[in-house]
């Protein structure tokens, strides 16, 4: 791609602010990757706000993470696009908080932003035809030396491995596996459940019957908690559950911190090499 | 005779059955299922992924599931029941098949009405903790 050209020209027809942020990110990707990430994060935030105002009702949090979560839960934002937007949000936040962004990371996010912006345009104007060309990576303003190329290769490998680890974590958390046909599984389970329901209804039920279950499920939490048999247990249960949940959240946050450390380590190596060369 | 399943498979099978019974898959197909598996049941990421491997879980029936939970140690089975009830409470509504699945699981495990109520209290607490603020439920 030569100077002055852009991958994001098509965005002008749909959202000028998003288009401007994308082009700015593209411009900075080699010379100032941190600024590239700021712009990409802002671009994602702008897209999320637009989608929220178009597709959702009620009081939606202004926090980007929560906004993306709400869009995902409402079915507006598919999993793949959500992953991309969260990755940009995370790396944008890291850049804001002083963690240096390597050029290959910024380039990777720029490429992903290109794809997600095509999807965004389709969401804005349903039925509009958008045929994205292959992403054309912006060229560096000055030739890159071999040492930097090698380092970029290592960073790219690291990014790939971080991506795989994130995907693995996400897959472990969801209810269905990536290869499963959710519709088919749902159909089969519904069939089985209805058959068992008929059998249970015909045969009568043992200790815990459906009427009792319905009664307990319909009771207010406060009402059950007030029962002296459960009051103490529920408070203890909340403490224990909070501790366990905090533990998992900390584990996930620690993993993200490790990813950043690994990336920062490579960046420091680069500075070290540069000093040695001088 | 049904094959006895391991805890990770039992968890995902019983949790998704409750989700299907609730007719609200998009809401519950969140990280809550895996978070509960890892935080409360103590399963690893690897175990959670393996359990959902299509070859692993796709040929298992609800009868296999009920037979499996019946054979679990008391503590594990009660935790599993609590988690399944958490899924039921996730959307703040109750459907007839959810009630039926909870009843079948509780009977298979053999919990008393008191224990069942305690599981429900704990499930409600966890569901309220995991429910994002501002979300539809």
Image: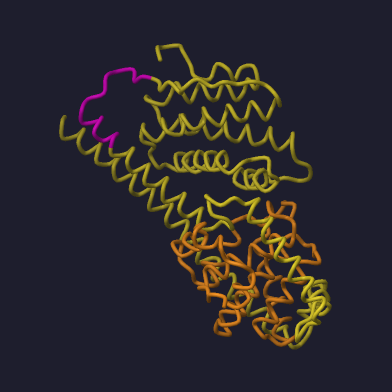
Chain colours: A yellow, B orange
Residue B31 image position (x, y, % from top left): 58, 57
Residue at the farthest left position = A277
Q: Is residue A277 above or below residue A178?
A: above
Question: Image point 75% across, 52% down: which residue?
Answer: B136
Relative horizontal placement of residue B40, taking residue B97 as reference (left or right): left
Closest to the observer, A162 or A167: A167
Closest to the observer, A163 or B24: B24
Visible residue check, residue B128: no
Q: In this view, does A270 lie above or below A60?
A: above
Per the rendered image, the range of residues in magenta is A139-153
Q: Is residue A205 above or below residue A219?
A: below
| Quarter in which the N terminus of chain A is drawn | top left
Residue B40 image position (x, y, % from top left): 55, 72
Residue A85 occupies which quadrant of the picture? top right
Residue B125 image position (x, y, % from top left): 69, 71
Question: Image point 56% across, 82% down: which residue?
Answer: B71
């Amino acid at each position: 791609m030569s100077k002055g050209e852009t991958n994001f020209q098509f965005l002008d027809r749909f959202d000028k602010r998003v288009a401007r942020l994308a082009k700015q990110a593209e411009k900075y990707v080699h010379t100032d990757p941190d600024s590239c990430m700021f712009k990409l994060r802002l671009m994602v935030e702008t897209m999320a706000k637009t989608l929220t105002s178009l597709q959702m009702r009620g009081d939606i949090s202004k926090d980007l993470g929560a906004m993306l979560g709400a869009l995902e839960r409402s079915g507006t934002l598919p999993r793949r696009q959500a992953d991309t937007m969260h990755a940009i949000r995370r790396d944008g936040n890291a850049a804001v908080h002083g963690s240096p962004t390597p050029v290959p990371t910024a380039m990777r996010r720029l490429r992903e932003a290109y794809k997600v912006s095509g999807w965004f345009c389709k969401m804005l104007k349903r039925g509009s035809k958008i045929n994205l060309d292959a992403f054309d990576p912006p060229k560096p303003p000055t030739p890159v030396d071999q040492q930097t190329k090698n380092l970029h290769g290592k960073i790219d490998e690291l990014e790939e491995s971080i991506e795989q680890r994130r995907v693995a974590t996400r897959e472990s958390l969801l209810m269905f596996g990536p290869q499963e046909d959710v519709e088919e599984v749902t159909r089969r389970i519904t069939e089985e459940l209805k058959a068992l329901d008929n059998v249970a209804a015909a045969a009568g039920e043992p200790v815990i019957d459906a009427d009792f279950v319905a009664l307990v499920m319909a009771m207010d939490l406060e009402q059950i908690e007030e029962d002296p048999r459960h009051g103490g247990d529920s408070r203890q249960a909340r403490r224990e559950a909070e501790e366990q949940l905090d533990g998992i959240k900390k584990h996930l946050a620690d993993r993200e911190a490790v990813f950043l450390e690994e990336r920062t380590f490579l960046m420091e190596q680069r500075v070290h090499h540069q000093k040695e060369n001088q | 005779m049904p094959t006895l399943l391991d805890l990770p498979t039992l968890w995902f099978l019983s949790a998704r059955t409750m989700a299907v019974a609730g007719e609200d898959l998009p809401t519950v197909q969140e990280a809550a299922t895996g978070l509960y598996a890892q935080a409360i049941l103590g399963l690893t990421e690897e175990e959670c992924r393996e359990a959902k491997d299509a070859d692993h879980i796709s040929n298992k029936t609800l009868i296999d599931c009920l037979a499996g939970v019946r054979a679990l140690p008391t503590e594990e089975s009660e935790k599993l029941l609590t988690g399944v009830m958490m899924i039921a409470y996730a959307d703040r509504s109750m459907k007839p098949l959810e009630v039926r699945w909870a009843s079948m699981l509780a009977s298979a495990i053999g919990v008393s009405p008191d224990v069942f109520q305690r599981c429900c209290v704990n499930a409600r607490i966890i569901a309220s903790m995991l429910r994002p603020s501002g979300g539809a439920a």
